[in-house]
C-alpha cells in the first residue's frame, strides 16, 4: 500500500490503514525522537503521540510534502516540546544506560585487549560528554545536527522538515559542527575525556 493510499484510507477512518502507517513508519519516528531526547522509553512515548496527532489531523494534511517529511516534522516538534517540558531532567543519564548496555553487548561479542573495567567507564564518560555538548547547542543547530547524523537525512530533506532553505540548513550544520568542535576541544584541553 502506497503512502497516498494510506493517506486516503486514513481520511476515511480506516483502522487497517492506521496500522499500516504505524508499521511502515514506526522505526523512523522512534529513531527521530530518540535522536533528540536520547531516551528509548521517552522516544517510544513521543512516537505514540506523533501517530495520534497524525490520526487526528490527517484531514488537514494537504500532501504538499511527502508523508515521511510530515512525520519527521511532527516528531521533531513533539520531541522539542518534550525536552522543553523536561528541562530539569538530565536526559543524558538514560543515554548513559543505553550506551552501557550496548558496550556490554559489544564486549560480550568481541573480546579485545581493552576488556578491562576502565575501558567501559571511559566510553560511557565520552558518550555523556558528547551528548552534553550536543544538548548545549542552540535548538535549530541541535535539530539539524541530529537529523543529519542520527537519521542520515540529506540537506534537502532536513530543509523540508525544518521548513527552511537548503543554504540555511548548511549554515546550521556548519555552525553546529564548529560549536561542537570548540566545546569538545575545551574539554580535551581540560583532560575531561
Image (cartoon, rainbow, N blue to C red):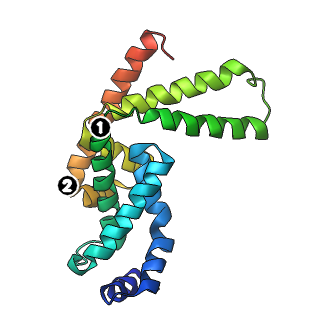
The answer to whether residue 11 is visible is yes
Residue 144, percent across and down?
A: 31, 46
Kindly give the residue lying farthest to the top in the view shown: 190
Name the residue rendered at 34%, 22% in the picture.
182
Whichever of labels 2 and 1 marks the residue nearer the N terminus, that label is 2
Task: Identify the secondary structure beneath mark 1.
Answer: helix
Is 179 placed left or right of 104 in the picture?
Answer: left
User: Are discs 2 and 1 less than 8 Å apart at CB?
Assistant: no
Residue nearest the observer in this picture, 101 or 166: 101
Label 2 crowd (10 A; few <14 / some 14-19 / many >=20): some
- In the image, residue 49 above or below residue 130: below
Residue 88, percent across and down?
A: 32, 32
Label 1 crowd (10 A; few <14 / some 14-19 / many >=20): few
Task: Identify the secondary structure beneath mark 2.
Answer: loop
Q: CA distance from mark 2 to mark 1?
A: 14 Å
The answer to whether residue 151 is visible is no
Residue 102, percent across and down?
A: 64, 40
- In the image, residue 165 above or below residue 58: above
Name the residue rendered at 38%, 28% in the picture.
133
- In the image, which disc is placed on residue 128? none
Instruction: Tell me how many marks there are.
Output: 2
Residue bearing the label numbered 2: 165
Name the residue rendered at 26%, 61% in the picture.
160
Name the residue rendered at 32%, 40% in the picture.
86
Residue bearing the label numbered 1: 174
The quadrant in which residue 64 appears is bottom left
Amino acid at each position: 500500500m502506497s503512502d497516498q493510499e494510506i493517506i486516503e484510507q486514513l481520511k476515511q477512518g480506516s483502522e487497517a490503514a492506521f496500522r499500516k502507517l504505524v508499521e511502515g513508519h514506526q522505526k523512523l519516528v522512534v529513531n527521530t525522537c530518540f535522536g533528540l531526547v536520547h531516551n528509548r522509553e521517552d522516544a517510544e512515548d513521543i512516537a505514540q503521540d506523533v501517530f495520534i496527532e497524525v490520526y487526528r489531523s490527517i484531514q488537514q494534511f494537504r500532501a504538499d510534502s511527502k508523508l515521511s517529511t510530515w512525520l519527521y516534522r511532527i516528531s521533531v516538534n513533539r520531541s522539542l516540546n518534550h525536552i522543553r517540558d523536561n528541562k530539569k531532567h538530565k536526559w543524558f543519564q538514560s543515554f548513559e544506560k543505553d550506551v552501557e548496555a550496548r558496550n556490554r553487548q559489544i564486549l560480550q561479542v568481541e573480546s579485545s585487549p581493552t576488556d578491562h573495567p576502565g575501558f567501559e567507564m571511559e566510553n560511557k564518560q565520552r558518550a555523556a560528554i558528547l551528548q552534553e555538548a550536543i544538548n548545549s547547542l542552540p535548538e535549530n543547530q541541535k535539530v539539524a545536527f541530529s537529523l543529519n547524523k542520527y537519521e542520515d537525512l540529506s540537506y534537502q530533506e532536513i530543509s523540508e522538515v525544518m521548513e527552511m532553505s537548503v543554504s540555511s540548513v548548511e549554515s546550521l550544520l556548519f555552525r553546529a559542527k564548529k560549536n561542537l568542535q570548540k566545546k569538545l576541544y575545551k574539554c580535551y584541553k581540560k583532560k575531561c575525556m
